[in-house]
Image: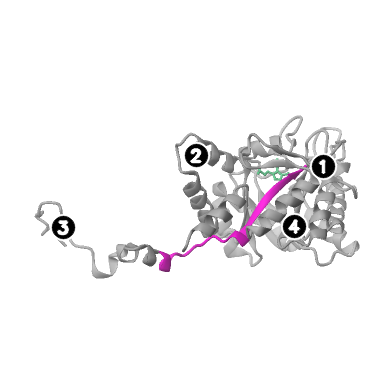
Amino acid sequence: MTSVLDPQPTSAIPLPAAGHRLRRTRRTPALRALVRETRLHPAMLVAPLFVVPGRGGRTPIPSLPGSFRLTPDEALAEARSLAALGVGGVIVFGLPAAKDAEGTGAWIADGVVQEAVGRMRDADLDLVVIADTCLCEYTDHGHCGPLLRDGRVDNDAAIRLLAETAASQAAAGADVVAPSAMMDGQVAAIRAGLDAAGHLEVPILAYAAKTASAFYGPFREAADSAPAFGDRRGYQMDPANAREALREMAVDVAEGADLLLVKPALPSLDLLARARERFDVPVGAYQVSGEHAMIAAAAERGWIDGRRTNLEALTSIVRAGASFVITYAAADVARWLREESR
Ligand code: PBG
């Protein structure tokens, strides 16, 4: 091929060696598809759902474009349409009718999550129904467990309530419970609670390496779960620590975690890669609300291409080691993936 450039005095500049012309496999779309190492599939996506009491309610969440506060009947309708798109699962969060110091709304048999999950079970949907197991949406102070007199979360009281919550979610029909409170011993306590209640087959998805991240902002607005005072740094991890994150994961696996979750996703790709190498349980990632909001806001301004950015972010998360990803873009991504021929 002739160059558009003038012939250069190239004698001093070595040509690429024969085996080092990596552009060969990038020449056509078909070649690129043949050598592609990472592919997304709708079945590996999990959509978060926010459930509120009532009937027929579907209120948009301003900070989470595309997400809604749904009443249990609407949550069922949403899950049904996600299943039709081939999305792999939903993770259900609740905003209770009333909050108290202990978070009673989390484990009562007629709680919002229990009702939504029960409807999904009765509908026998072809997707995985995951219940987020935490107390911060249910406590009036917004922390992830009951408080000691000095304002710290009472770890050992919290894990008893988390076990109670997980058992009630399993009784309602959750396929998987996902403890996100970052309390020590929560996985072991929940496993014991589930087993004692006869839910031997319900797996635990442990939010094992969950950092005290600034990226959860929009979620806390969506779930009305911002702490009334202080922050979560006394229980969620310091984002600066990778070795400690691996210890958190090792402890959760030892306590009986069936699946591990790394969160947030894009800021934790190193943790994902290391988790994938070190542990032989399935490892997932949570592309959290702030990660979603940044892409949505920049795309709205026309600064980035929302579709391509989202697909690239999710592909990177999977390339780093995630087998599944919780993402607010699940429905959109499932639609986009259907449009791609390769
Ligand atoms: C509950 C919980 C949170 C998120 C998932 N589960 C909030 C928090 O820890 O403050 C955040 C998810 C998101 O930002 O999308 N503890």
Report the residue at 15% width, 53% height from top: 4
Determine whether 323 is above or below 213 in the image. Answer: below
Q: Which mark is residue 129?
A: 4
Earlier residue among tags 1 and 4? 1
Counting every numbered tag in the picture gives 4
Counting residues from the start of the chain, the first of labels 3 and 4 encountered is 3
Mark 2 Cα shell of 10 Å, populated few (<14), some (14-19), many (≥20): some
Q: Which residue is mark 1?
A: 55
Q: Give the number of the disc on residue 13.
A: 3
Q: CA distance from mark 1 to mark 4?
A: 20 Å
What is the spatial separation of the Cα atoms under label 4 and label 2, in whole angstroms?
30 Å
Classify residue 293 as left or right of residue 220. left
Q: Quadrant of the N terminus?
A: bottom left
Q: Position of residue 21 (x, y in %)?
A: 28, 65
In the rendered structure, which amino acid carries the disc numbered 2? Ala
In the rendered structure, which amino acid carries the disc numbered 1? Answer: Arg
Q: Residue 303: give x, y in percent of width and height.
A: 45, 37
Q: Quadrant of residue 260?
A: bottom right
Which region of the structure is painted magenta? 33-51
**Alpha carbon of mark 1 to alpha carbon of mark 2: how far?**
33 Å
